[in-house]
Amino acid sequence: MTQRETILILDFGSQYTQLIARRVREAGVYSEIVPFNTPWADIANRHPKGLILSGGPQSVFAPDSPHPDPAVYEFDGPLLGICYGMQLLASRLGGRVAPADRREYGKAELTRTRSCCLFQNLPQKMQVWMSHGDHIDSAPEGFDVVARTANAIAAMEDSTRRRYGVQFHPEVVHTPLGKEILKNFLFNICGCSGDWNVRSFIDEAVARIRAQVGEEQALCALSGGVDSAVAALLVHQAIGDRLSCVFIDNGVLRKNEFEEVLQTFRESLHLKVVGVDASARFLERLAGVSDPENKRKIIGEEFIRVFEEEARKLGEVRFLVQGTLYPDVIESVSVKGPSAVIKSHHNVGGLPEKMHLSLIEPLRELFKDEVREVGRRLGLPETFVRRHPFPGPGLAVRIIGDVTPERLAVLKEADQIVVEEIRRAGLYDQVWQAFAILLPVRSVGVMGDDRTYENVIAVRAVNSLDGMTADWASLPYEVLATISSRIVNEVRGVNRVVYDISSKPPSTIEWE
């Protein structure tokens, strides 16, 4: 297999780092994010066509500011620094970084001061998005200042050493021509061919899986979501009926999900699937447990036990398939600064260590929208492709507090109403996720002539590209009104509905 051309992005903690990777991939070039302190040997072994130093929240002259392996600056290929990354280049290579007299946050007008590779075929004046408190006071020797804003050096380049820096963020939509700037770096400077796409990914993945599995058997744990479904389809394309799938009802699935998903997998996708109703044993283990991490661990442990029992029935199996995605990997890697662990992810770790199976994670390089496109190419029905993400611990982490059969029944009914009304309004494909949460409080209400003291449901709907960041969705008032009216009238035990208007960060998408 030929070496895939790759752009590596060193993560210094910017909230936009994942956006850089996405923009590079959208241009047809494969990209990966690595921690800022990745040893140079690991970087060199990937043979990158170019390096990008991300932005970050710290100051380059702060005592604890993050710095890369010094060998990064000696890289013999092109290097682009963005915001903090530009300031790193300047300070390391002999320039001067200083606190800005006037900090820049938000839109600014950039003016090109001379021709340069980064801005080739772009206008002299452009809108860009700034977010910095320090600035470049003087560029290093050998660098030309190629653009300015009213308050700062906006871009610099050393075309001889192929070192480039921009003070603004080309990856965000608020820099309208940012994609063109990144394309100039990728194609005119790095010499990338731009031949990475979903079709090439599928071909590479199938060949890799065939080589890894050989003539052995593989097992896939289906969750009911798009990730595990696409992973199973990809492995099935590679090894056919030597893949067996297990779909376990853990008791905290959505209403009717167990039956509907089994039918789709078996009849539409023609996968070998064993369905296991283990809801009673999961709910027994969850009784009296309110801590969210304990819920996750209990569900994970019980899942392993059930899965092991089913695996033994299937005979000799050496490989386990999981639908791990790239954001799962990023959020589950603890590195001081860039990517702290937010919460444990059900797809990262666990099963292979317990079961002594070799792991196949065919999607761990992909973002969610890329996974959906792979699913389409492999024939996954569109209704399944567009399904909203669903947490591994299911409704257990959408019930705040104890998980009981009674509370679970309330949430299932409320959640189904939320999804039905979002679909009816034509909004399902326009939001990343929409769901209900059962709160651990009761409120006073009036129904008919009687005073009530019943449950509160929170409705959560967010917009996101990959789940790494998210904004709350501005659902129309009439849709919210219908959702609230239906829940209160149709779900026994609920007398109040509230709407969550917090974004990620500072909140997470799920409440637990």
Image (cartoon, rainbow, N blue to C red):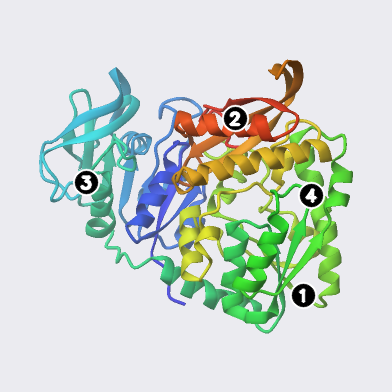
* Residue beneath disc 2: 485
* Residue beneath disc 3: 158
Q: Is residue 467 visible?
A: no
Label ID, residue 388: none
Find residue 214 and report its horizontal and vertical position in percent.
Answer: 65, 82
Question: Residues at badges 3 and 1 in contact (C-beta under 8 Å)?
Answer: no
Instruction: State how far apart marks 3 and 1 are (Cα).
Output: 55 Å
Task: Give the mark nearer the N terminus: 1 vs 4.
Answer: 4
Which element type, helix, strand or loop, lies under badge 2?
helix
Label ID, residue 251: 4
Of marks 1 and 2, the one in the foreground: 2
Which residue is pictured at 80% across the width and 55% down the height? 303
Q: Is residue 245 visible?
A: yes
| Viewer-proximal residue among 152 and 290 | 290
* Residue beneath disc 1: 317
The C terminus sits in image quarter: top right
